[in-house]
Image (cartoon, rainbow, N blue to C red):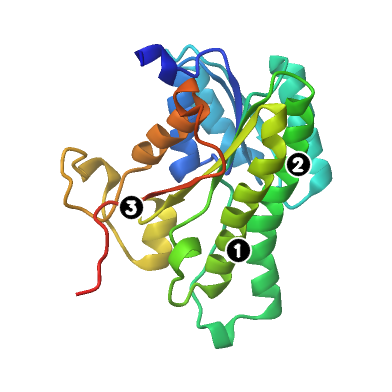
Amino acid sequence: MTISQFSVDGKTAIVTGSSSGIGKAIVGRFAENGANVVVTSREASNVEPVADEINGSDAPGEALAVECDVTDRAAVEALVSATVDEFGGLDVLVNNAGASFQASPAEISENGWKTIVDINLHGTFHCSQIAYEQMSGGDGGHIINVASVAGQRGSKNMSHYGAAKAGVINYTRSVAADWAADDVWVNCIAPGLVATEGVRTQMGIDDDADAIDRSRADRTIGRPEEVADLAQFLASPASSYIVGETIPIQGVPQLEE
């Protein structure tokens, strides 16, 4: 294996929910390594500064800002069309857009349940299916879904979110088997705690991402850039024999005593 096996140079990638946190780290990492990236979220005012920052840097990849609500199928179709028009194709989709809130299972409203499932699971379905239509008509591609360890083991006060992410994990494995014949790799990342603004506001964890020491093994919170490392691996030729898998990234395993 050589370093070139991990390259995304020359690829075109859409990363949903990329105005901040993990998604922003992924578009930044991809662009630094030569990929053209589409920065997208529900509000153009949030993604345009991210794209401008990439385009104003020394990164060899270019960035395009596109407003898109992943629960709106027409908006997703427009997103993929804009990507192809700008960059000539689509090689990588990272389904990172998501939402959550904490609530007791007995207190979650029907609307709250539907909203979380719609964004996390239905949005993944829209984007994956439309991206697959584009990829399968060409040279294939990579779809990387971002779930959560909550989707693997559950989480208190997050039953709606855990259920939606469990659906994403199962969807990943199911469509990977169907779409492999068209050279579309589908895999999933399941992060644990990552130092993002969402984690700070919802869970009251105020760890500063820049202060987290990546050289330490003994920790249970990560940096967005560490998830971006894994996303690049799954988008590169180095992951060519990984299909339909969900890879947790959560630091030290939490074992029962």
* Quadrant of image for the C terminus: bottom left
Query: Quick one: 250 or 118, which is closer to the camera?
Result: 250
State if disc 3 and disc 1 touch (CB < 8 Å): no
Query: In the shown orientation, is residue 130 left or right of residue 18?
Result: right
Residue at image position (48%, 11%) is 60
Amino acid bearing label 2: Gln
Query: Quick one: 94 or 254, which is closer to the camera?
Result: 254
Residue at image position (68%, 45%) is 175
Label 2 Cα crowd, 10 Å radius (few <14 / some 14-19 / many 20+)? some
* Residue at mark 2 to residue at mark 3: CA–CA distance: 28 Å
State if disc 3 and disc 2 touch (CB < 8 Å): no
Query: Does 168 appear above or below 116?
Result: above
Amino acid bearing label 1: Ala
Where in the figure is residue 225, as x and y percent of width and height?
Answer: 36, 36
Query: Quick one: 205 or 235, which is closer to the camera?
Result: 235
Q: Which mark is residue 129?
A: 2
* Residue at mark 1 to residue at mark 2: CA–CA distance: 17 Å
Disc 3: which residue: 250
Where in the figure is residue 95, as x and y percent of width and height?
Answer: 60, 43
Query: In the shown orientation, is residue 203 left or right of residue 86?
Result: left
Query: In the shown orientation, is residue 133 left or right of residue 91?
Result: right
Residue at image position (34%, 51%) is 195
